């Protein structure tokens, strides 16, 4: 078991294959201190790192309690008693007091990992992981906090969360309940985050850590296009293969804060959890609150090591259901092909063209329900528009099945159009502040998914639709941020709970869907990639990456996404050209190469393609069938980044047995004087000999990695190549 407790040192030790995490109980008061996190170390006593006796006197005898607490590295920070850095736990008592201090009470260590009620979380059995629960308490408030840590046997990952329980006789209002805190000394850290906007999600940002607080957050009710619930502290010289990296990623789909703070003595406090702004949770006597889970990863092999750990954790311990680890069907989606302008015949034309070339599924996007012919009506009316689709979805799905294809359907269950039967019957179902007209976005309002009767109403409709035909895939969309966050069903002193209750409501709906349709392949989507987070991944093994389907912009979007998420999670389609997003013209073959590593599909009117483009489809699908499993299940290695060199982009996936590696190389911009590109490789087995599909050259893995691969200068911009290295 990777977790132990030393009575003598009063220290908990959490070991993963290459990392050690130490927590010590200090002083008779029982402060829970963070002693060490980093490369795995033997069973040494490391408590001197806490600097308790160096310069500062112990807590009890000191006249300097406040100064002492302000520099003590702690496990879960609280405010009001001298620690003036960010607090994980903030509260207000019935008397209006906000002071809180936690000390150790007891602990429990056991094999496996408990589920978090109502929340997505990593899972693992006794053979995979061990869990430590530390019970802390504020004796003056009768408040208990249970800190949960799970350490994985084969992965350098630790999952953390906190459960807060009111054992007293009066209500306590939580005003912040973050998931994890990590205190350490600065080591010339860079802060890495992912930022963006609609159509430009998850751009990598790296800057030196500065004094004070910095980080990313969302207050949009969704994890958002703009920021990712993630931060990494990487040594300044850390790159893909070298250097220490500490990462935090939140398994949650709503408001969040991920923040690093450098304080007076160059100590760093990184925290992650639900954003305190707009959050409140009333704990009645006996009530409890479970925070979402934070994943902590330590890598001493740079960002590549961090990426591999996250990919393996998510593929093996977060993604569930029959589609986990299974090749995902290639598909054609009609959104960019037709938008709202389709009927059954048009869809069947596309399906016939697709089926004849081997595409496995047709996905019918927005516009099949109510009277929806544009985006200003009918959300909430989940019944088929028989004018467009006579015979309903059953007829269409049957015809598509007859072609040998699967059928998938788009829905947007969390929304309502003011122009809909649902809204006319139940205007109070939408989020709104009484007396204030709610803000529209894309002419739609957000349903109050925190309410059970609203969830039931939407779910019953969905259940009926999905039972009416052979629908094997659902694309669950969500096209606006939350505003007017007030619920008719929450008391005034509980309105702060709304954002979190909304997220719990979404999780409950998706859980119900998967329970009732256990073979369903669910894809989440949020105006593209506005809710691409680990929470969503627990319900859907794949997520639509971005509404920006231009192949060159996608290089950057997919690079940022793949920093954290397995390629099998990333929806990637060959789309219409000129690009509907930015007008750029790229060759069909290049669009195919850019989409290949993800969940591959087409999103354009196949019936209007030129013959030579149509002729390329079987070859692209053959590549997906052959190499998709290497991209999806293997180790992803970022080789070159167009965002850095402004010329070319290259990624490689290496199968777990190291027998095959596939390089996806895109030449973006020609530079006049450029000779052949020398591409450094990593991630191969040094001793295995690999043959290049490009030149036939055979070299050892060491030869390819340390010598690099020469790529011939490509003619023309926006071209690409797939190169396979196979063990001989
Ligand atoms: C936003 C999605 O990201 C698109 O793929 C498409 O499904 C539209 N919504 C439909 O309204």
Image (cartoon, rainbow, N blue to C red):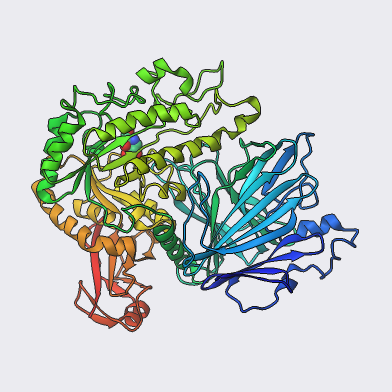
Residue 329 is left or right of residue 246, and the answer is: left
Tell me: residue 480, above or below residue 105.
above
Q: Quadrant of the N terminus?
A: bottom right
Residue 509 is left or right of residue 11, and the answer is: left
Residue at figure coordinates x 48%, y 28% from the top left? 448
Tell me: residue 355, above or below residue 318.
above
> Percent x, y for residue 452?
48, 30
Q: Which image quadrant for residue 92?
A: top right
The answer to whether residue 577 of the structure is visible from this angle is no
Q: Which image quadrant for residue 495?
A: top right
Residue at figure coordinates x 75%, y 58% from the top left? 264
Residue at figure coordinates x 43%, y 55% from the top left? 318
> Percent x, y for residue 606?
15, 42
Viewer-proximal residue among 554 and 399 = 399
> Percent x, y for residue 248?
54, 57
Viewer-proximal residue among 714 and 214 = 214
Residue 242 is left or right of residue 89, and the answer is: left
């Amino acid at each position: 078991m990777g977790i132990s407790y030393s009575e003598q040192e009063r220290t908990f030790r959490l070991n993963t294959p290459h990392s050690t995490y130490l927590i010590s109980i200090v002083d008779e008061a029982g402060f829970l201190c963070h002693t060490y996190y980093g490369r795995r170390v033997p069973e040494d006593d490391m408590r001197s790192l806490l600097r308790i006796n160096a310069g500062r006197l112990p807590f009890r005898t000191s006249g300097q309690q406040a100064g002492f607490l302000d520099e003590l590295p702690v496990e879960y920070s609280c405010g009001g008693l001298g620690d003036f850095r960010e607090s994980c736990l903030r509260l207000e008592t019935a008397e209006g007091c906000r002071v809180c201090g936690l000390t150790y009470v007891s602990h429990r260590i056991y094999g496996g990992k408990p589920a978090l009620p109502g929340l997505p979380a990593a899972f693992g059995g006794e053979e995979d992981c061990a869990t430590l629960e530390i019970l802390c308490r504020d004796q003056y408030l009768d408040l208990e906090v249970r800190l949960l840590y799970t350490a994985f046997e084969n992965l350098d990952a630790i999952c953390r969360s906190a459960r807060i329980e009111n054992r007293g006789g009066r209500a306590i209002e939580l005003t912040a309940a973050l998931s994890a805190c990590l205190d350490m000394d600065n080591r010339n850290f860079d802060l890495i985050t992912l930022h963006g906007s609609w159509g430009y999600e998850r751009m990598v940002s790296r800057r030196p850590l500065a004094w004070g607080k910095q980080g990313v957050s969302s207050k949009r009710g969704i994890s958002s296009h703009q920021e990712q619930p993630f931060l990494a502290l990487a040594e300044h010289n850390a790159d893909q293969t070298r250097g220490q990296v500490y990462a935090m990623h939140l398994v949650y789909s709503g408001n969040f804060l991920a923040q690093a703070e450098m304080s007076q003595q160059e100590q760093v406090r990184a925290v992650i959890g639900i954003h305190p702004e707009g959050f409140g949770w009333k704990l009645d006597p006996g009530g409890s609150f479970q925070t979402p889970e934070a994943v902590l990863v330590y890598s001493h092999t740079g960002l590549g090591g961090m990426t591999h750990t996250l990919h393996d954790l998510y593929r093996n311990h977060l993604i569930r259901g029959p589609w986990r680890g299974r090749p995902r069907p290639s598909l054609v989606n009609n959104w960019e092909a037709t938008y709202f302008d389709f009927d059954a015949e048009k869809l069947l034309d596309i399906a016939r063209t697709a089926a004849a070339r081997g595409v496995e599924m047709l996905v019918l996007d927005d516009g099949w329900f109510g009277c929806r012919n544009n985006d200003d009506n009918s959300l909430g009316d989940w019944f088929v528009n028989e004018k467009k689709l006579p015979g309903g979805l059953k007829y269409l799905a049957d015809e598509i099945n007859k072609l040998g294809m699967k059928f998938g359907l788009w829905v947007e269950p969390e929304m309502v159009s003011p122009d809909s039967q649902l809204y006319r019957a139940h205007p109070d179902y939408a989020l709104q502040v009484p007396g204030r007209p709610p803000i529209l976005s894309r002419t739609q309002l957000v349903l109050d998914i925190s309410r059970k009767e609203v969830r039931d109403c939407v779910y019953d409709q969905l259940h009926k639709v999905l039972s009416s035909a052979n629908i094997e895939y659902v694309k669950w969309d969500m096209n606006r941020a939350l505003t007017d966050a007030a619920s008719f069903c929450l008391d005034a002193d509980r309105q702060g709970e709304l954002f979190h209750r909304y997220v719990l409501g979404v999780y409950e709906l998706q859980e119900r869907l998967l329970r009732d349709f256990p073979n369903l392949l669910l894809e989440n989507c949020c105006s593209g990639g506005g809710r691409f987070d680990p929470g969503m991944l627990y319900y859907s093994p794949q997520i639509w990456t971005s509404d920006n389907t231009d192949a060159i912009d996608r290089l950057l979007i997919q690079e940022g996404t793949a920093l954290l998420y397995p390629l099998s999670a990333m929806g990637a389609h060959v789309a219409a050209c000129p690009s509907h997003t930015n007008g750029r013209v790229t060759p069909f073959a290049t669009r195919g190469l850019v989409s290949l590593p993800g969940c591959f599909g087409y999103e354009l009117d196949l019936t209007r393609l030129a013959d030579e483009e149509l002729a390329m489809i079987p070859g692209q699908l053959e590549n997906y069938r052959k190499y998709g499993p290497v991209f999806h299940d293997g180790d992803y290695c970022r080789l070159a980044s167009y965002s850095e060199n402004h010329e070319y982009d290259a990624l490689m996936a290496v199968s777990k047995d190291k027998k095959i590696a596939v390089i996806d190389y895109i030449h973006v911009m020609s530079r006049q004087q450029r000779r052949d590109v020398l591409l450094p490789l990593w991630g191969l087995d040094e001793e295995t000999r690999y043959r290049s599909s490009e030149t036939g050259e055979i070299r050892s893995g060491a030869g390819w990695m340390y010598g690099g691969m020469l790529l011939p200068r490509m003619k023309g911009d926006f071209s690409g190549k797939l190169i396979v290295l196979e063990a001989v």
